[in-house]
Image: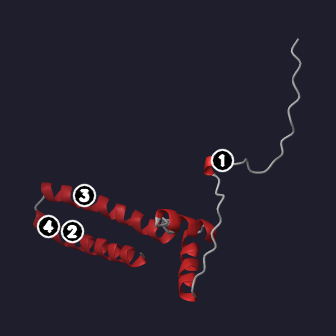
Amino acid sequence: MNTPTPKCPSKGGRPKKPEDEQRLFPVKVYFDEQSYKKLLNKRRRTGISLSTLVYELAVNGYVKEPISKEEVSLLRSLAGMANNLNQLAHEAHIQHFSQMEDRVQHLANEINEVLIRIISER
């Protein structure tokens, strides 16, 4: 009969990183007020810690910012408009394009407005 071996109690907490992934060398950096405010603004937009932000900028040269909820909403509406435009193009091939011209022009104007809003967000 096999008797279960007692397990070591879990210490809890986050497991240690492998030695090759550990960051062992701290660097102290000073910023002027304007640069520090830019850094804080970027931290607010990305939602990551200040030290991680400085590390990513120093090592990679950039930090990828997440897409905001408003931008996601604009992209969704743009996808819907693109679908509508495809349907209008299909109808235009079946019917005469001159009958579809007003609807296509209206939709093109709406798409243009959404694109301008997306660009202005960035």
Q: Amino acid at mark 4?
A: Gln
Task: Give the mark nearer the N terminus: 4 vs 3.
Answer: 3
Label 3 SS: helix
For mark 3, what is the residue? 86
Task: Give the mark nearer the N terminus: 2 vs 1.
Answer: 1
For mark 4, what is the residue? 99
What is the CA distance from the residue labelled 2 to the residue labelled 4? 10 Å
Q: Is residue 37 above or below residue 84?
A: below
Q: Are marks 2 and 1 in contact (CB under 8 Å)?
A: no
For mark 2, what is the residue? 104
What is the CA distance from the residue labelled 3 to the residue labelled 2? 10 Å
Give percent across and percent down for residue 32. 57, 86
Which of discs 4 and 3 lies nearer the camera? The answer is 3
Q: Are marks 3 and 2 in contact (CB under 8 Å)?
A: no
Task: Give the mark nearer the N terminus: 2 vs 4.
Answer: 4
Q: Are marks 4 and 3 in contact (CB under 8 Å)?
A: no
121 or 57, which lies in front? 57
Q: Residue at x 22, y 70 (%)?
A: 103
What is the CA distance from the residue labelled 4 to the residue labelled 1? 69 Å
Task: Give the mark nearer the N terminus: 4 vs 1.
Answer: 1
